[in-house]
Amino acid sequence: MSRRVFMKGNEAAAEGAICGGCRFFFGYPITPQNEIPEYMAKHMPEVGGTYVQAESELAAISMVFGAAAAGARAMTSSSSPGISLMQEGLSYLSGAEIPCVVINMVRGGPGLGNIATAQCDYFLATRGSGHGDSRSLVYAPSTVQELHDLTAEAFPIAEKYRTPVMILGEAILGQMMEAVDLRERRDPPEPTSFPWAIGGVRRERPPRIITSLYTRHEDLEAKNREMEARYDQARREEVRWDESGADDPQIAVVAYGVVARVCRTAIERAAARGVRARLFRPISLFPFPEAPLAALAERVEQVLVVEASLGQLVEDVRLSVEGRAPVSLLTRVGGVMITPEEVQDRLEAMSRGSVGGV
Amino acid sequence: MPETATAERRVFGRPQSLTDAPFTYCPGCTHGTIARIAAEAIDEMGLSDRALVIGSVGCSVWTYNFFNLDGIGAPHGRAPAMATGIKRVHPENLIFTIQGDGDLAAIGTAEVIHAAVRGEDITCLFVNNGVFGMTQGQMAPTTLLGQVTTTSPQGRTAEREGFPIPMSEMVALCPGAAYVTRVAVIDPPTVREAKRAIRTAFECQMAGRGFSLVELLSICPTHWGKSPQEAVQRVRDEVLQVYPLGVLRSPPAGTSTDGTAAEE
């Protein structure tokens, strides 16, 4: 029996993690994600879990590294400036092939920026997992329900690929309240059940070593190639996206997260004015849904990318579309939420031919 | 009763908790001594199937290869945070870090202080040789005034480079710290004392009494530009004047300090 509740996004994410078997949370306060560590501090004891407040994001991600290396389902959460600090640990986790989950509730930047909604960490999330040739799998929910579900599902995915999984939310998603069907709280696997995990009483088991250090060049290349193979597997098996709108579209609108919901409203309103547009919403940002977007691009005259960053998502769109249709960009940044009217105006202008792709 | 000429009794050997991997330390370095006495303490306590070593960044980076234990490498300075994560999952484990002064007393200052304040049941073995060794002998927070290094080529001055850090004294102020001591590994008496200190720290941890730190004054003949004998003499003449040996925070009652397990 699911529990239907009215809940804030950040709390739904935290409850999703508990439902997904997370039992170790290491947090550090930063707005706009404070409800996640607060929820964990309050509710982890109900499932015999552990909440530790770290002295910094550097320490928090290193605690996650330790707990996850010991076989626990462990996670942390932060917002943009804190995620910058976590890049160190994410790189080590990637290199040591240790699964974990990290939530980034993105705020305006760069620097201290502000605490309002933004998508400006798209590159930070999708272009690597700290230094080195590393990746996190990245998922971008657009509703509180999807945030809850993806956070729960992130743990087994992280274990399948032995890599960090990042939930990339926008500040507004963490702060909004919506109805959610909560999942059952599931117990995690035994920490000692993983064949790579350290810790516990070994008895006859030979010692295990977890490291990201490979001083022989050929050894590191081999390790890099192993990781490449897993990223390629993720490209085949973990791509997620959603489409809605016109079945015979002139325009494909590409947007993710809450911005995609604004676009859906704009597309519905523009349809009443005769504009045939179709929303393409990537859910997995890495791996990016390249093939399905390319297929859609074959069927449209133009592609419009709408994002709350200065042209980050548009790079993946162009790499996917590969010239099949002209691609143009509409952005609001700095914490400003784009409105349906702005998107609708652009769609109608594109439909009239007064604004083209570039 | 005639003695059998062929009878042999093994009086010395490699501790069970060490592998047969050759140490990668420079000739004359005392890092290997520290690994050995830590392994001996683990063997004596019967914890070789539940001890876990955390290597750091610097000369201790390959630490996990030398111990016949589960091991993991931490990012620079973060070993106490990583130890926290592991210990929270497996409180039954004996978890210790081996960290140099460039690691624990510079980039890792926050992590060690806060692990101590939280009273984490972990042990940090803090190897103080006054330089960044692995990176070829740059100034460390523990470099003495007047000491010449590759990044204090005129000799460290208080005005230009600041003072040597009293790291263990700072940790000893923390209420969650159960046992903080400074020992040396420069001759047989100090090595014996160092081993007793490590064992006391491990016993504190396994008794759940809180955080423990053992600072081990070490030598770096390579980057001090001295023979091992000269380096040992420098510790006696100069280092001990700034970093005197002794217990900085005593273990709580009920924890032995003589290398024998405490009665619970």
Image (tube, rainbow, N blue to C red):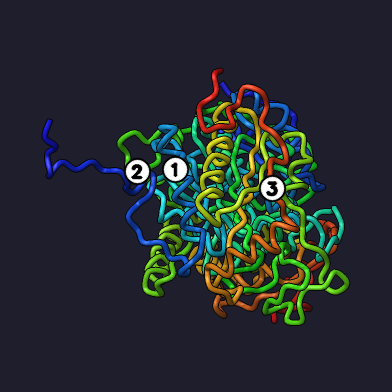
Q: Chain of mark 2?
A: B
Observer-side mark, 1 or 2, equals 2
Name the kind of residue labelled 2 in the image.
Gln
- Estimate how packed mark 2 is, as few (under 14), some (14 to 19) or many (20 or more) residues with alpha carbons within 10 Å: some
> What whole-number distance in Å separates the C-alpha atoms at marks 1 and 2?
19 Å
Residue A276 visible to the viewer: no
User: Residue A76 at x, y = what percent?
Assistant: 65, 45
Q: Chain of mark 1?
A: A
Residue designated by label 2: B16
Name the kind of residue labelled 3 in the image.
Val
Observer-side mark, 3 or 1, equals 3
Residue designated by label 1: A198
Q: Residue at x 63, y 53 (%)?
A: B78
Secondary-structure class at tag 3: helix
- The reply to the same-chain question for discs 1 and 2 is no
User: Residue B198 at x, y = what percent?
Assistant: 55, 41
- Residue B79 is left or right of residue A352, and the answer is left
